Image: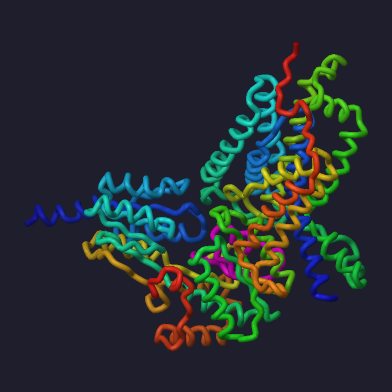
């Protein structure tokens, strides 16, 4: 018995999950960095360790999954919608391997899929934009034109119109290829154009390209809204808030569950109700989010959770999953 | 002021900014090709300079020191290409491509090593970045109808590099067509044997051209990361080097037509951002995918139909061998 007890922590310390990032890279101050923080959170709370990998091109997605699966990693967490197909292929080859994929849905008996209701978080930041704008004009800049990004756009627009039905809204997409995520110059240029035409708050869902939008906000003396991670600190005073996607919580929870043996395959959807999405308030933007605004936001949050307000999911048609 | 006129001004303002790196890089290519060296490494040199400039500006806090460092890095790469093309008589396309690939990998790797920001450099602020220059009496002149807004919106309010870029065009025209050095340079690209017969070193001329090429590419790269943007982001040149090459061919290897080509590319790019999501009379809203295609369609149509006979320097791309 004593031998068994001493074995248990030893086994747990052997437990080594793996995180594989998307192309944005580990320290993108956005989506991937949130995953990294989740893994760090796991390491801190459990005292365990983990491994991670940054692919440099899309061809490496499947290779990386397969390589870690072959080496019998305890849990492989892949972050990003681009992993949908590679994960499906590799999960089939290694039926005993636990996989978690974030942002994509893979139906396999050994895969846990975690997705977010970005439209619900975007609805709230849309409300903030509409309450903060002085010109009655707000903007949206998306990275690559894919259904996931349209989900941000539609939620944001509905939130803005919920507060001010007559609001003017400019929408831009940066491009249709992967380079749209890494083009801060283009992001800044689109933002400049929107600001010049009267917008005073722009929400960008565009990865590193969004840094250009935040920079343009600082140059123009206006507001931007960050995305995925809390980006309020990047240009203090010019980031109104950030739409948080708690990828960190999702990664940490999944790793802890696997460590404790409570990990289960299947689909998990994290919305406002599950605190999977939110808006960020910290010392950099507390002055901009007034109490009256907070009251309206919390009221809307409660209504969304209770189902009184249903935010349109732009991806529901595209994927046919209807979630 | 009518909204339409203001829209045009915003477009022109945006055009000047977007065309800045293109003009500089296209002129860099022009000097190289006029001397007889094909340079498809513009992209890599810009990216290398963008990284060096942003890194040096972040460390020293001076945009000008950043610019000098960027120019230095770019000149080293240009001389490397020159050495391969001139002394080693290597394949110039291969050498140029090698530079592009090497820099695309090396710059983010070094950035990660030094700054730990996922292949980015820290955001630049204040004197570490080229600030926009507001021209005198903008308030007074801006109030004048029609011409006022043109002065305030389009002419005033760019960074030093944009004004410098516009100045390099007449300078290039003067150097190439009005100086002895320019005459010899052009001769080296057309008929190097004649230059050699006259007792002038073709090698020296081509190396000088590559130094000018490096300086111009260096300024172009610095404009990306320290003027238009505020940090280096991986792959931030986003194909601008190749677009510049197209502009140079489209401009028939002549400075002023090349400038026009760059301005046209910049304008179409600005226009596509502006047209996204706009309801046009009769046509309705144009889909994002189509507007994003516009710059490329324009390029193909113009190159196919309007340019007329394109005449490359005759000895361009051919290594010179002394008898």
The boundaries of the magenta stretch are A201-230
**Res A236 seen here:** no
Residue beneath the point at 67% across and 47% down: B240
* Depth order, front residue of A233/A221: A221
Q: Quadrant of the C terminus of chain B?
A: top right
Residue A315 vertical placement versus A18 (above, below): below
User: Is residue B45 placed above or below A184 in the rendered structure?
Assistant: above
Looking at the image, which is closer to me, B43 or A231?
Answer: B43
The quarter of the picture where residue B244 lies is top right
Q: Which residue is outermost to the top? A: B323
Answer with the quarter of the image where residue A303 lies: bottom left
The answer to whether A21 appears left or right of B280 in the picture is left
Report the number of numbered marks: 0
Q: Position of residue B201 (x, y in %)?
A: 81, 18
The coloring applied to the image is: rainbow
Query: Residue B41 placed where, x, y %?
Result: 65, 36
Q: Taking A297 as reference, is B57 left or right?
A: right
A221 falls in the magenta region: yes
Farthest left residue in view: A1
Q: Nearer the viewer, residue A119 or B89?
A: B89
As drawn, the residue found furthest toward the front would be: B305
Quadrant of the snapshot with the N terminus of chain B:
bottom right
Residue A91 in picture, x, y percent from top left: 29, 54
Evaluate whether residue A274 shows in this view: yes
Residue at the image position 79 percent from the left and 48 percent from the top:
B306
Vertical placement of residue B92 versus B143, above or below: above
Is residue B138 part of the magenta span, yes or no?
A: no
Give x and y (percent) for residue A268. 33, 70
For the point 83% across and 76% down, the residue is B2
């Amino acid at each position: 018995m004593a031998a068994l007890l001493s074995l248990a922590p030893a086994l747990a310390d052997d437990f080594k999950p793996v995180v594989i990032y998307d192309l944005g890279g580990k320290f993108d101050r956005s989506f991937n960095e949130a995953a990294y923080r989740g893994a760090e959170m796991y390491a801190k709370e459990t005292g365990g360790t983990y491994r991670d990998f940054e692919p440099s091109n899309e061809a490496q997605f499947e290779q990386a999954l397969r390589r870690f699966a072959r080496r019998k990693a305890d849990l492989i967490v892949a972050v990003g919608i681009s992993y949908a197909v590679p994960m499906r292929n590799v999960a089939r080859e290694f039926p005993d391997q636990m996989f978690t994929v974030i942002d994509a849905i893979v139906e396999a008996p050994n895969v846990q899929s975690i997705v977010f209701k970005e439209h619900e978080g975007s609805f709230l930041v849309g409300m903030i934009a509409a309450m903060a704008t002085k010109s009655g004009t707000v903007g949206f800049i998306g990275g690559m034109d894919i259904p996931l990004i349209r989900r941000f756009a539609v939620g944001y627009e509905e939130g803005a119109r919920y507060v001010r039905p007559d609001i003017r809204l400019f929408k831009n997409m940066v491009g249709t290829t992967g380079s749209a995520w890494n083009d801060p110059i283009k992001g800044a240029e689109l933002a400049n154009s929107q600001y010049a035409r009267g917008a005073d708050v722009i929400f960008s869902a565009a990865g590193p390209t969004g840094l250009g939008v935040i920079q343009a906000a600082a140059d123009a003396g206006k507001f931007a809204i960050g995305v995925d991670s809390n980006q309020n600190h990047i240009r203090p005073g010019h980031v109104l808030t950030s739409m948080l996607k708690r990828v960190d919580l999702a990664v940490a929870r999944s790793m802890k569950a696997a460590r404790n043996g409570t990990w289960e395959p299947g689909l998990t959807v994290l919305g406002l109700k599950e605190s999977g999405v939110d808006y960020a308030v910290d010392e950099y933007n507390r002055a901009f989010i007034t109490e009256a605004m907070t009251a309206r936001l919390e009221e809307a949050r409660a209504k969304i959770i209770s189902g009184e307000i249903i935010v349109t999911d732009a991806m529901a048609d595209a994927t046919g999953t209807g979630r | 002021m009518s909204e339409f006129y203001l829209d045009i001004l915003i477009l022109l303002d945006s055009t000047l900014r977007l065309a800045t790196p293109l003009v500089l890089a296209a002129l860099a290519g022009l000097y190289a090709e006029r001397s007889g060296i094909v340079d498809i490494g513009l992209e890599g040199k810009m990216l290398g300079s963008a990284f060096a400039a942003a890194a040096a500006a972040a460390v020293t806090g001076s945009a000008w020191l950043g610019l000098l460092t960027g120019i230095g890095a770019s000149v080293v790469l240009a001389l490397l290409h020159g050495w391969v093309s001139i002394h080693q008589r290597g394949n110039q396309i291969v050498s140029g491509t090698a530079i592009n690939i090497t820099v695309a990998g090396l710059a983010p790797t070094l950035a990660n090593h030094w700054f730990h920001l996922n292949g980015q450099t820290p955001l630049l602020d204040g004197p570490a970045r080229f600030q926009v220059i507001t021209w005198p009496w903008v308030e007074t002149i801006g109030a004048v109808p029609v011409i006022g807004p043109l002065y305030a919106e389009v002419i005033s309010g760019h960074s030093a590099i944009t004004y410098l870029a516009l100045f390099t065009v007449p300078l290039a025209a003067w150097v190439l067509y009005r100086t002895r050095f320019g005459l010899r340079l052009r001769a080296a690209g057309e008929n190097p044997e004649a230059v050699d017969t006259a007792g002038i070193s073709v090698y020296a001329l081509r190396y000088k051209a590559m130094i000018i090429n490096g300086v111009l590419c260096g300024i172009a790269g610095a404009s990306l990361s320290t003027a238009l943007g505020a940090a280096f982001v991986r792959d931030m040149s986003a194909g601008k080097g190749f677009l510049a090459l197209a502009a140079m061919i489209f401009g028939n290897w002549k400075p002023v037509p090349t400038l026009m080509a760059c301005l046209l590319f910049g304008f179409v790019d600005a226009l596509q951002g502006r047209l996204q999501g706009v309801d046009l009379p009769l046509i309705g809203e144009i889909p994002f995918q189509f507007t994003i295609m516009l710059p490329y369609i324009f390029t193909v149509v113009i190159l196919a139909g309007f340019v007329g006979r394109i005449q490359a320097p005759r000895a361009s791309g051919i290594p010179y061998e002394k008898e």
